[in-house]
Amino acid sequence: MSNDVWALAEINNGKLANISLQLTTKAAELAAAFGGSAAAVALGTNTQAAAQELGACGAKTVYASEGEVYNQYLTQPHAETLATLIQQHQPRLVLWGGTNYGRDVAARVAARLGLSIEYNVGEVAVEGDGIVMTVPAFGGAQSVKMQFTGEGTKLLGARQNAFPTSRGGGTPQVEQVHAPAVPAKGAKVSGPFGTEGAEEAGHLGKAPDGHDIWMPAASRAKLEEAQVIVSGGRGLGGPQGFQQIEDLAAALGASVGASRAAVDAGWIPYAHQVGQTGKTVKPTVYIACGISGAVQHKAGMGTSSLIIAINKDKDAPIFQFCDLGIVADLNVVVPQLTAAVKRRKGQ
């Protein structure tokens, strides 16, 4: 087994996800600590352009496999190529992102090769000759330090936006890898990113059990990639309250997030949860509406460049760490803010 550390890049129809750069930066840091080399695995289309970005973040080598089969089929071709590369090169550690893609591919590779795997890692460091990981436990109320044991390549799943991006690298050596054949059996992607027929505007829908649930617009940036996020919490009073969050998000071109309390109440799908047990985000602007700011929520958005809080409770914890706090009824302030943004944009 080598001392090399790899990052599994995520490419969606030719576009490199931000988490790929975060993972590559961390891979370079860990590889240096082990005395090895950092590499990235890029599977999909437009891999040459992706390779240059990955190299800038510290990847000395990029294993690039170009092929439409990666866009046309879910998981299976990705897992097959990654598993083959791991068997050939035996890296010490492979970092992958805690996205649906990363979890799906890594789980299949771990099962196929019998490798150790850990999910939801927020911090990772080298101590002695081992890897120490920090993982949330008990619903995010506690953090647990963990270590891998045994021999063989380890698979480490990192929370999105857990690591910073650094572009201090150079030009990588790109090794071309043959794409696998079209699977005889396999789940095919329906439409771009599997979202064919998705609603363009947010709307109030029905959950499987029949209760009302807000379905945010599907046409905006993924929460973990968004530069502006408007989030709602228990202070909205119900799923209907997300209409004003949606209106402000639409005016700003932002994505919609939510606190765990709103998700647990069934007001909005889990995919929009921000926090220690949800998505970790790092936007330029984060607007929290009716969110108290518990430590678990802060863990998911505390590194945002500008945090704006709107809450009628002047003692809400979020006012202790936000950059701009508005003590007022969100049902008054949010519509006024939306109207002001629209006026500014001439809408």
Image: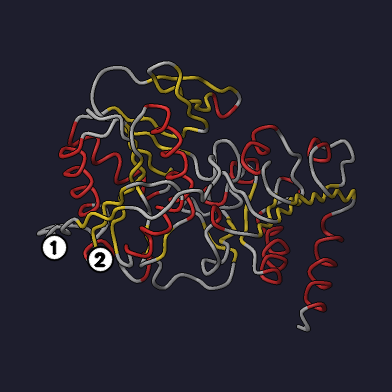
Disc 1 designates what residue? 182
Q: Is residue 150 left or right of residue 229?
A: left
Give the image quarter of residue 65. bottom left
Q: Is residue 254 left or right of residue 67?
A: right
Q: Position of residue 45 (x, y in %)?
A: 30, 66
The quadrant of the image that shows the C terminus is bottom right
The numbered dot on residue 281 is none
Query: Foreground: 21 or 321?
Result: 21
46 over 25 or under it: above or below = below
Disc 2 is placed on an element classified as helix
Q: Residue lying farthest front?
A: 170
Other residues around mark 1 within 10 Å, as few (<14) / some (14–19) / many (≥20) = some
The quadrant of the image that shows the N terminus is top left
Disc 1 is placed on an element classified as loop
Identify which amino acid the numbered label 2 is placed on: Gln
Q: How many marks?
A: 2
Q: Position of residue 110 (x, y in %)?
A: 25, 35
Q: CA distance from mark 1 to mark 2?
A: 9 Å
Other residues around mark 2 within 10 Å, as few (<14) / some (14–19) / many (≥20) = many
Tell me, yes or no, whether the two marked residues, 1 and 2, touch with CB atoms within 8 Å. Answer: yes
Q: How is the image coloured?
A: secondary structure
Disc 2 designates what residue? 72
